[in-house]
Amino acid sequence: AVVTPALAQSLPTINWRLASSFPKTLDTIYGAADTFVKRVSQLTGGKFNIRVFAGGEIVPGLQVLDAVQAGTVECGHSASYYYFGKDPTFAFDCAVPFGLTSRQHTAWYEQGGGRELTREFFKGYGVINFLGGNSGTQMGGWFRKEIKSVADLKGTKMRIGGFAGKVLERLGLVPQQLAGGDIYPALEKGTIDAAEWVGPYDDEKFGFYKVAPYYYYPGWWEAGASFSFYVGLKEWEKLPKEYQAAIEVASYEAHVVMQAEYDARNPTALASLQKKGVKLRAFPKDILEASYKAATDVMNEEAAKNAKFAKIYEPWKQFRKEQNLWASVAESSMQNFLISTVRGGK
Amino acid sequence: AVVTPALAQSLPTINWRLASSFPKTLDTIYGAADTFVKRVSQLTGGKFNIRVFAGGEIVPGLQVLDAVQAGTVECGHSASYYYFGKDPTFAFDCAVPFGLTSRQHTAWYEQGGGRELTREFFKGYGVINFLGGNSGTQMGGWFRKEIKSVADLKGTKMRIGGFAGKVLERLGLVPQQLAGGDIYPALEKGTIDAAEWVGPYDDEKFGFYKVAPYYYYPGWWEAGASFSFYVGLKEWEKLPKEYQAAIEVASYEAHVVMQAEYDARNPTALASLQKKGVKLRAFPKDILEASYKAATDVMNEEAAKNAKFAKIYEPWKQFRKEQNLWASVAESSMQNFLISTVRGGK
């Protein structure tokens, strides 16, 4: 941190703790909190210091929201769909099945009403949320056997949670909840048949390819998983305006850097996995279509009984529709042509 | 701006001028400079003030780099391919034909060596460059007549400049240089047959659809046009570290917000244009393929005679290849499925 003595006298020294939901091994996601706190410190002449704690150091990774709400920590970095069990509405702040891609989510949050809608919802938990990175479209996960149609999903025990698990259950899959470190032995023993994690860069480190060689895509439950910084509203309101501005602006940097890191690292990891014999497979079309239908059913049912969910779902659905109509014109025709040239070896 | 008297005493008051290349009518692009300077002011307790001037107010829009280099202004906001005439290497900082998409460019700049490579090049002009927004894939422009194959391009007078003009010349098209305000009358009179501008949001305001109803996509010369903030290196080195940090971090915010604005506004504008009778057309495959070949030839020829160009082109080309191989897996399969659902009315 840059310490400017004159500045140091003019604004208060503030020390905060940030609870991350993530282990340091997920360095790209965990690292967003580091990027964030370093910049906040630098912008405030070293006076506003936030110390980052990995998942489990202060509270378990899946309880970061609770810790910020309770004031155990002043702020956090998490994936809002972890709190799906409290209310599925949380997922809109992160990812819902067949939801927005990374750029679409950012556009929705920034310019499509997403900031206002999600903040109104988070207010009920005493928290204010900021953009905090995105993984891009994730992979569909590792399967011990090839999956050729919806019929093959029946009885498949897969490590997958939350919204996606609820959707896949309707297709006969048996969702399992397992912590990251327990996935490999379970796949190896055959206690589970499949597991989803993130994408090539994170997945390669776990060595899943050794025990489940079929690597499916896309992870339609995470078209773009958006991460968030949480700040306790009471703490937020006590901050000097310059410190609030530092948090706001630093969150943009962390948001950009995480996606850029994933984009830069995934291609190399994918090539490395392919050299190791991984069998890349696209989910069959009937699985995508059945999953889309089941996801729509689950979301409509939730909207019918949960007014908070419905309040975000309706405008979000319209936004998604308009985004994909526009994406079908310039952006995806360009992307698909670029892919065709590289596949054609040109 | 937030003025904190104590802070105001501790750091110097600095007043800078920023020359934008853009008119205020391009509010999304021009607005990035506003976003940027407001945040810089806020982060510095109102002490570091940068005043934005639209294209032509201090210097013509296409001379912003020169103005920053000469010290006429301390900083600027521009599209680096405007300086293609000085050296085609500038285009890597913005867009080259069949280049990187918005996310890929950001990944390249942030994590793929792009920042280091482009800054080394800009140093020769006494300037340091920062990310300053992206438009996403632009449209291919407005044509008075339908274009069904490469043969139809022969003799077509099109308002298109720089790199793209050089490539399309090889296919028999006749590139024309026209300022934004002169495009409509030229299309109306038939002095030109076609013109490219940006995308639905910006194009609709000009009313091009009234005189050239065929609206082509994608604008393969701008798979993602990235804009940049320029700061004079001598001025940069004189800044207190906190002010440097404010510039660095504010550029990320402006970068995110511009792309989000385009993403949120283009869908509505496209729908509105379609209601007005615009005829949307994809460029025929033979045009894309011939253009790709011509673009590759032009770039290879430039690399053979220009060491600065070659130094960026070689690693950039490898990065583009890896990016598109990875994009073909999770991201584009997801995007294409989402498009198929919305087109199917699901």
Image (cartoon, coloured by chain):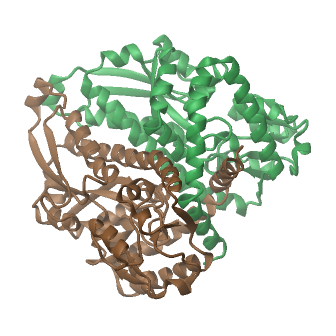
Chain colours: A green, B brown
Q: Is residue B324 visible?
A: yes
Q: Is residue A19 visible?
A: no
Q: Is residue B56 left or right of residue A221?
A: left
What is the residue that sits farthest to the top in this orientation? A70
Residue at 31% from the left image edge and 70% from the top image edge? B185
Locate residue B57, reporting x and y percent: 14, 58
Position in image of residue B29 (x %, y %)? 32, 53
Position of residue B333 measured from the top left corner of the image (x, y, whole percent) = 68, 55
Give the vertical position of B70 relative to A299 (above or below): below
Relative height, residue A287 to residue B274 (above, below): above
Q: Is residue B51 left or right of residue A268?
A: left
Q: With A209 as the anchor, is B64 left or right in this view?
A: left
The residue sitting at 33% across, 27% down in the picture is A49
Q: Quadrant of the C terminus of chain B?
A: top right
Of residues A89 and B324, the one nearer the viewer is A89
Residue at horizontal 36 percent and vertical 75 percent from the top: B159
Query: Could you say which is closer to the camera, residue B111 or residue A173?
Result: A173
Q: Quadrant of the N terminus of chain B?
A: top left
Give the left or right position of residue A301, taking residue B89 as reference: right
Tell me residue A341's x, y (percent): 61, 73
* Depth check, front residue: A150 or B208: B208
Residue drawn 59% across the image and 19% down it: A308
